[in-house]
């Protein structure tokens, strides 16, 4: 399946998990592929973003292959699920 965004998150982080679960509940059209990096993460499957890099900051991979980082990942996610930037 082709996603608009692959969203890398730390499933062991309570804050990250809360935000991700909220976004999952709003992503009714399944535009986002949520990837928990705390479970068997393989950088070669995600544009070689290392585990250390992914843990340091939010990372997203657009459908075009472009990598976005930090608050841009959240902003784009909110747009995809129809909430805009809150």
Image (spheres, grey):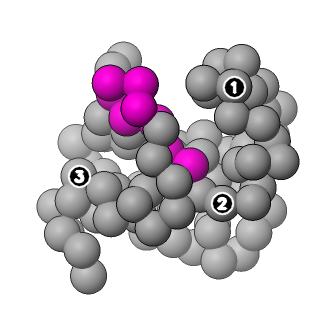
Q: Which residues are magenta?
A: 59-66
Kindly check if marks 3 and 1 are in contact, taking CB atoms under 8 A apart as contact: no
**Which residue of the protein is positioned furthest toward the bottom in this rendering?**
86
Tell me which label, 2 or 1, sits earlier in the chain: 1
Q: Residue at x 43, y 56 (%)?
A: 73
Q: Is residue 47 left or right of residue 40?
A: left
Sequence order check, earlier mark of 3 and 1: 1
The answer to whether residue 52 is visible is: yes
Q: Which mark is residue 57?
A: 2
Q: Nearer the viewer, mark 3 or mark 1?
A: 1
How many labels were placed on the picture?
3
Disc 3: CA contacts within 10 A as few (<14), some (14-19) or many (>=20) = some
| Residue that appears at 40% across and 60% down | 72
The numbered disc on residue 48 is 1
Q: Are marks 2 and 1 in contact (CB under 8 Å)?
A: no
Left or right, 8 with respect to 6, comes to right
Whether residue 71 sits left or right of residue 78 in the image: it is: right
Q: Is residue 3 above or below residue 73?
A: above
Q: Could you tell me which quadrant the C terminus lies in?
A: bottom left
Label 2 crowd (10 A; few <14 / some 14-19 / many >=20): some
Q: Quadrant of the N terminus?
A: top left
Give the labeled residue for mark 3: 80
Query: Which is nearer the N-term, disc 2 or disc 3?
Result: 2
Q: CA distance from mark 2 to mark 1?
A: 15 Å
Q: Residue at x 51, y 71 (%)?
A: 19
């Amino acid at each position: 399946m082709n996603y608009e965004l692959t969203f890398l998150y730390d499933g062991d982080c309570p804050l990250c998990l809360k935000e991700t679960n909220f976004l999952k509940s709003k992503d009714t059209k399944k535009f986002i592929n949520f990837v928990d990096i705390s479970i068997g993460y393989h950088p070669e499957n995600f544009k070689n973003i290392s585990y250390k890099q992914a843990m340091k900051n939010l990372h997203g991979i657009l459908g075009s292959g472009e990598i976005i980082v930090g608050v841009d990942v959240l902003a784009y996610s909110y747009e995809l699920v129809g909430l805009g930037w809150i």
